[in-house]
Image (tube, rainbow, N blue to C red):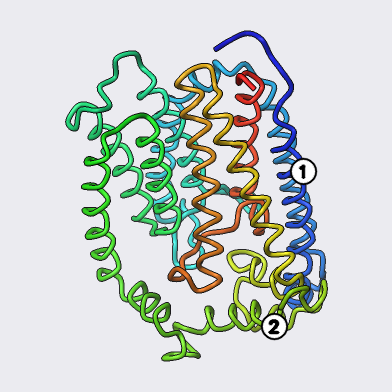
Amino acid sequence: MKNVRTSPDYVIVVAILLLLSIGVLMVYSASAAFAYHKYGDAFYFAKRQFLFAALGVFAMLWISRLDPQKFYEWSKPGLIICFVLLIVVLIPGVGILRNGARSWLGIGAFSIQPSEFMKLAMIAYLSRMYAKPGFPIESFAKGFVPGLILLGLAFGAIMLQPDLGTGTVLMGTGLVLIFAAGARMKHLVGFMLLGIVGFVGLVLAAPYRIQRIVAFLNPWEDPLGAGYQLIQSLYAIGPGGLLGLGLGMSKQKHLYLPEPHTDFIFSILAEELGFIGAATVILLFAIIVWRGVRVAITSPDLFSSLVAMGITAMIMIQAVINIGVVSGAFPVTGITLPFLSYGGSSLTLTLAAVGILLNLSRFSNR
């Protein structure tokens, strides 16, 4: 790591702050009716989202000023801690059950989702492993398999919750990182083919996942059951047109579309702000990916390059899956939209990851 520091990538900073601002605004708009109906306070979720965003930005700025050597040193203990938490969360009476998944740890209103932290810990540790001088990444047994074993163990622990959405993001991010590290394409293609078979097996093993696939192919076959959420999402996106119905004018958020301020916030955004608003959000994500890849390419060492690529891939994969789900391109799965969806663990963790990316951008050869 070179010692000459420059300013962080302000293009990333601006894009993140714009997405956060849009996110807080849309969380309020999407949740106001439900929040008032349930809690008597239309700002219930918006106030909490603003607090999460403020804490996340503080963490982002603090992390962006740390000695980057800390990320290397913390990668191994961080991974071990995350594996322990993934086991602890499965213990009945310890892990908190929400929406059918035992994915949370916490007391009262404060809770964390260990699987979210595992994504970042896995990025850091795999980058450390592959950055070791002489690591045989092109070898199947000694280079490709060790990373897959770690990913498989984490994926398996997350699936015991179960949380297919987070597990998919973890595996996708890991494969991008392995590819960036220099793995042979034939190894990656072979694993992806095997992964497709495994994914089909996971779907067939759970009836509710089969229902989601059926609803994805033809949601109108069961419009009041498995296809309801996707149909309501499309009913939100369709009327938005070019300019939208106007901020606060969504109809689907009035207890028609489930999870309007979390997984399906993009649907409400498209309904109220139209194609222009939706395209603006997609453009901001594209800018983050562009600048993140640029940081990875211009980083002075392999570890920094892989960490930057992994964080960028994590954000990109999660955004693509979420937008694909709400628009009917992918089957419904529980994945939030980074920086926009309501949620403390996901938002603060993702902002912390961006803080690492900004930190590395200060040392890149820009």
Q: Is residue 206 above or below residue 229?
A: above
| Residue 283 to residue 210: above or below | above
Residue 214 shown left or right of residue 198 in the figure: right
Name the foreground residue: 63 vs 316. Answer: 316
For disc 2, the marked residue is: 239
Identify residue type, mark 2: Pro
N-terminal of the two: label 2 or label 1? 1
Helix, strand or loop at mark 1: helix
**Residue 23 - label:** none
Judge the density around disc 1: few (<14), some (14-19), many (≥20) Cα neighbours within 10 Å. Answer: some
Classify mark 2: helix, strand or loop: helix
> Which quarter of the image is occupied by the N terminus?
top right
The percent coordinates of residue 116 (x first, y second) are 51, 46
Relative image position of residue 313 (x, y in whole percent): 49, 43
| Alpha carbon separation for disc pair 2 and 1 | 33 Å
Position of 321 with respect to 350 (left or right) is left
85 left or right, relative to 352: left
- Rendering coords of residue 123 (x, y %): 45, 34
- Mark 2 vs 1: CB contact within 8 A: no
Q: Decide: few, some or many residues near mark 2? Use Cα within 10 Å; few <14, some 14-19, many ≥20.
A: some
Residue appearing at x 77%, y 49% in the figure: 18
Who's the residue at 31% across and 37% down the image?
Answer: 150
The residue singled out by tag 1 in the image is 54
Of tags 2 and 1, the one toward the viewer is 2
Mark 1 is on which residue type? Ala
Q: Which quarter of the figure is the C terminus placed in? A: top right
Count of numbered marks: 2
